[in-house]
Image (spheres, helix red, strand yellow):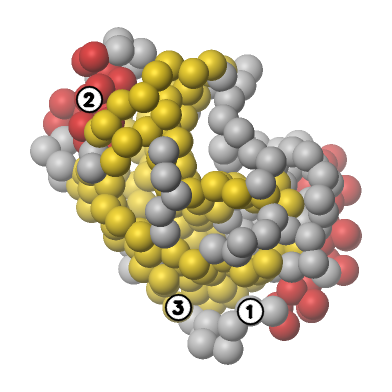
Amino acid sequence: MAPRTLSTLSKALLAPALALGATAGLAAAPAQAAVWNSCDQWGNTTLNGYTLYNNIWGSGAGRQCVWANSGTNWGVWADHPNTGGIKSYPNAKKVINKPITSLTSLTSSYNVTVPAAGAYNTSYDIWDTDYDHEIMLWVNYNGAVGPLGTAQGTVSLGGHTWNVYKGNNGANEVYSFLRTADSTAGTVNILPILKWIKDTKGWIGNETIGDVQFGYEITSSAGGLDFRTDNLTVSGG
């Protein structure tokens, strides 16, 4: 889950600590990352239609650096302490900006390499344009992490079987779909999931889907761990 804003004071307090770790973090980036890299808290760039964010937003965060060869081939090195609470959500974002009923398709393919240690989830974070509704699709997860809200049962949609949770974080509704078995590569047909939430459950109306984000929601990665997106595509129309 990525927050919309962070106070100026919080940014000011975090910046010095992040700056101290910038040099060490950059050294961990892979040699093939020649296009772009950043250890800045809010570092971002746009490559071939995708916007990449370093996005270190949680309290108690450590060092983190993101690198990219393209918007669909990128990764992150993160060294966050073994404490509770989400520290970051480095991600790549594709903007859709279409109402659900206007979409004829919305699909994504992913191929990732993730560590065996740490606490994190690899997830899609899908938002409406008003940021009232957040739909998370967890394709794998590790360690002491869990979804917000209460269990709503199990459903097979979009080529996968999910455990569904519904909750509210105080700012927006959150619908979490956790794949019943971890996957590091696959294709998700996202549109049937959106239609199920809208038509079958009635949890949302004909929302305009804004951002489709894909990345790593990291709680801990002590000692420095690598997360790599070997390939990512998001397409919809």
Instruction: For marks 2 and 1, give the CA distance.
Output: 39 Å
**Residue, x 42% and y 25% (percent of image)?**
164
Q: Residue 111: x and y, percent?
A: 38, 64
Q: Quadrant of the N terminus?
A: top right
The answer to whether residue 139 is above or below residue 231 is above
Query: Quick one: SS at disc 1?
Result: loop
Q: From the image, state whether disc 1 or disc 3 is nearer to you.
A: 1
Q: Earlier in the sequence, mark 3 or mark 2?
A: 3
Q: Is residue 151 above or below residue 220?
A: above
What SS does tag 2 mark? helix
Graded by Cα atoms within 10 Å as few (under 14), some (14 to 19) or many (20 or more), the crowding at tag 2 reads some
Q: Quadrant of the C terminus?
A: top left
| Disc 1 residue type (three-letter) | Ala
Q: CA distance from mark 1 to mark 3?
A: 11 Å
Q: Position of residue 147 (x, y in %)?
A: 57, 30
Q: Nearer the viewer, residue 184 or 7?
A: 184
Residue at x-position 43% and y-position 16%: 152
Residue type at tag 2:
Lys
- Specify the label residue 69 is tagged with: 3
Q: Of 188 and 32, which appears nearest the observer?
A: 188
Earlier-in-chain disc, 1 versus 3: 1
Q: Is residue 19 above or below residue 180?
A: below
Q: Which residue is mark 2?
A: 195
Q: Mark 1 highlights which residue?
A: 29
Residue 12 visible to an observer of this rendering: no
Q: Secondary structure at mark 3?
A: strand
What amino acid is found at the position of numbered circle 3 in the picture?
A: Asn
Q: Position of residue 202 (x, y in %)?
A: 30, 10
**Residue 73 in the image: x percent, y percent?**
42, 71
Q: Tell which of 133 and 115 is nearer to you.
A: 115
> Is disc 1 surrounded by few (<14), some (14 to 19) or many (20+) residues within 10 Å?
many
- Does residue 214 appear to the left or right of 223 in the view shown? left
